[in-house]
Amino acid sequence: MDFKEFYELALKLKNLPLPGEYSHHKMSPELRIQWLKENKITDVNPKRAGVMALFYPDFQEKTRLLLILRKAYEGVHSNQIAFPGGKEEHSDKNLLETALRETYEEVGVAPDAIEVIKELSEVYIPPSNFLVRPFMGLYPNPQPFVREEQEVERIVEVNLMEFLDEGNLIMEQLSTSYAKNINVPAYRLNGYTVWGATAMMLSEIRELLQQAL
């Protein structure tokens, strides 16, 4: 899809209600859904984070979605596909500022170059005890990305039509931090398996775009 066409489509999303848990559950393993039924997020005092789902034109003016591959490290999100973003800092006025700051730090996109379209539904991540607020943004005049080498292993530029293709919705057997060899719904994008919180956020964006098409 040409970015000009996508831009007009994205503007329609501003007034659409968020699908929330309905879309998240489509990409959630059963164990996670059960955990959320049995526990209150407020009881665990989660840390807060903000991430940015950024859409932009490539050199052919086709729409792309920006993801990153995180570095391998000693932690539950090691070597996973994610959105740019991270933990809220005391200096951040709100979680949007967190998402914009972290996007600049991780991939070099200036906050004032992003047109924020919509605040999306929060996703709780039990293994790391983070409550994450995603935002959807447009980056109409992209400059070369600058990878933060200590945190970002690779920049992953996904074609919009690949993301929307139902053939890239898969079920894969994975071992997580809380269970071994469980069936997990995921996306197959650019050769990577995208699952967990990122897949749930993508599911909500996909649902919104389908409503607007």
Image: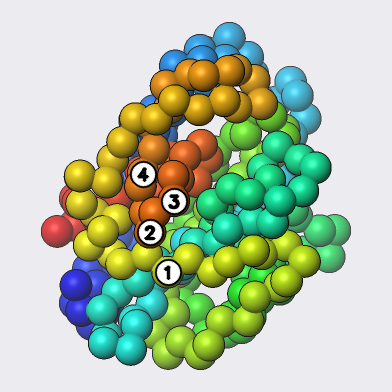
Q: CA distance from mark 3 to mark 4?
A: 8 Å
Residue 187 badge = 4
> Which amino acid type corresponds to the residue marked 3 in the rendered image?
Tyr
- Single out the mark in the foreground, 1 or 2: 2
Residue 192 badge = 3
Q: CA distance from mark 3 to mark 2?
A: 6 Å
Of 93 and 212, the residue lying toward us: 212
Single out the residue that lies furthest toward the top: 38
Q: Secondary structure at mark 3?
A: strand
Q: Quadrant of the C terminus?
A: bottom left
Task: Name the image colouring.
Answer: rainbow
129 vs 15: above or below: above
> Which amino acid type corresponds to the residue marked 2 in the rendered image?
Asn
- Badge 1 or badge 4: first in the primary sequence: 1
Q: Is residue 47 visible?
A: yes
- Single out the mark in the foreground, 3 or 1: 3
Kindly identify which residue carries mark 1: 157
